Image (tube, rainbow, N blue to C red):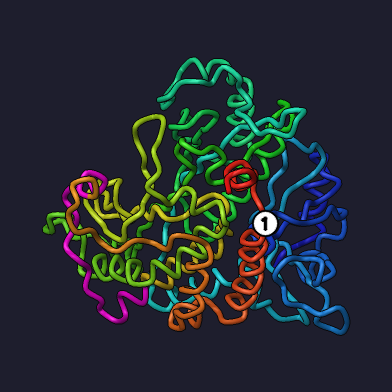
Amino acid sequence: MHNFETIAADLQARGIHSILTQFCDLHGVAKGKLVPVQNLREWVESGAGFAGPSIWGTGLGRFGRRSEYYGRVQLETLRDLPFMPGVAHAVCDGYAGGEPLATDSRQVLRRQLERLKVRGWTLWVGIEPEFFLLKKTADGQWLPADALDGLDKPSYDLKAIHRNRAFLDDMRVALTQLGFELQQIDHEDARGQYEINYKFDDALAAADRYMLFKLTAHAVAEQHGCVFSCMPKPFAGAPGSGLHFHLSLTDADGRAVFTDTTDPLLLSADGYHFVAGLLHHADALAALCAPTVNSYKRLTLSHSASGTTWSPVWKAFGDNNRTCLIRTVAGRLEWRLSDPSCNVYAAIAATLAAGLDGIDQAMTAPAACVEDLYERFASGAPMPGRLPADLGAALQALAQDTALTQSVGEAFCQEFVALKNQEWQDYSQSVSAWELQRYAEMF
């Protein structure tokens, strides 16, 4: 039993007066409110209340007992926010009518993890956040925040690191205070693009940590007069941002489920089955892992100014092969489909569901890819299957993949498909500057 009065008193003793009760909507955007710390018991046991229809994707009505969304504070997630003095951050689980809300993405991930718990397994996820630092000009253009960041091949550019050291160091300090174990900070392969890596965690904690990473990055970027952007591909002709998941499973004794040291790729039979499940459900997974119109500007065979593209276009896997959708690395799997516009809880949940289906159905993985798929494509040789070309096709694949939607949760998937179909229709009916420039005077 928790002594809420003691916990609240300890928080107040170190200057905490409010709790930022944070959840995320269907889009994966952080939402919440500030509540007084002295009412901690209420926030944990009943939850902070929100009008359900005001949140994207809850499916809650405008009246009745199930019209309110309640975010119940998870005590283990309480962290003092270094960029909001006097405020502690807490992750919330979504409830309605006193029951876990089926359309709440954190609850969706919890349900998948319960399936693992029955087997005595734990999913570990290492998340690699890539992002852009942007500024908006007076005439409405979005550009890299660093005007001098102009190299065609800017990966690992130390001059850009030096120019932006104030932002990067403030991120280092804030993340360290929040308990992140940082591993590296680098400039990525597009102008204005960075990556900050930190240690892996169990799946739920990893998803929570990524949401806290974004919250921190938005705040620190604003302090430096720029915008932290999770848009997958803001600039044509340059690489986009991924959100790669490094996946591994351990059993009740701590043994690596995916690993077999006698195998050439160090993968066990279950590891290969998991790979097969991911590839089998890849088209449907695209909708949840790459959920925006812009996501498919990244997932294409476009030319890159840097001369290199890392886009995982083909449904294939290979040992340390970054041209494949799945890269195997020393007995773990790198899932390269996700991008930072995803709802991280839903993306991890669906990825796990697909892999477990591969294990449960003993699916057979194709032969591992041992070549550069971009070079193979240029040669005209036969290729593995392609991912969906756009969001519309991905949503159709998700709607038709009943095995995956039933496993992830039909209520959540129905809300997701309905909301994202509207997004796709809005985009399809819009008229872009490119169209006007090309067609206005052409005919």
**Magenta highlight range:** 356-376
273 to the left or right of 166: left
Q: Quadrant of residue 426?
A: bottom right
Residue 43: percent from the left, percent from the top? 80, 64
Please tell me which residue lies in front, 229 or 297: 297
Residue 202 seen in this snapshot: yes
Seen in the picture, residue 285 relative to 130 is either above or below; the reply is: below
Residue 428: percent from the left, percent from the top? 61, 61
Please tell me which residue lies in front, 382 or 135: 382
174 to the left or right of 406: right
> Residue at point 72% right, 37% down?
219
Residue 359: percent from the left, percent from the top? 30, 75
Residue 374: percent from the left, percent from the top? 26, 46
> Residue at point 81% right, 60% down?
40
119 to the left or right of 376: right
For label 1, count other residues whose C-alpha is less than 10 Å away and answer few (under 14), some (14-19) or many (20+).
few
Q: Is residue 366 magenta?
A: yes
Q: Which residue is mark 1?
A: 430
> Residue at point 49% right, 35% down?
195
201 to the left or right of 15: left
- SS state under label 1: loop
Is the N terminus in the top left, top right, bottom left or bottom right quadrant?
bottom right
Seen in the picture, residue 273 relative to 183 is either above or below; the reply is: below
Q: Is residue 402 magenta?
A: no
Residue 42 seen in this snapshot: no
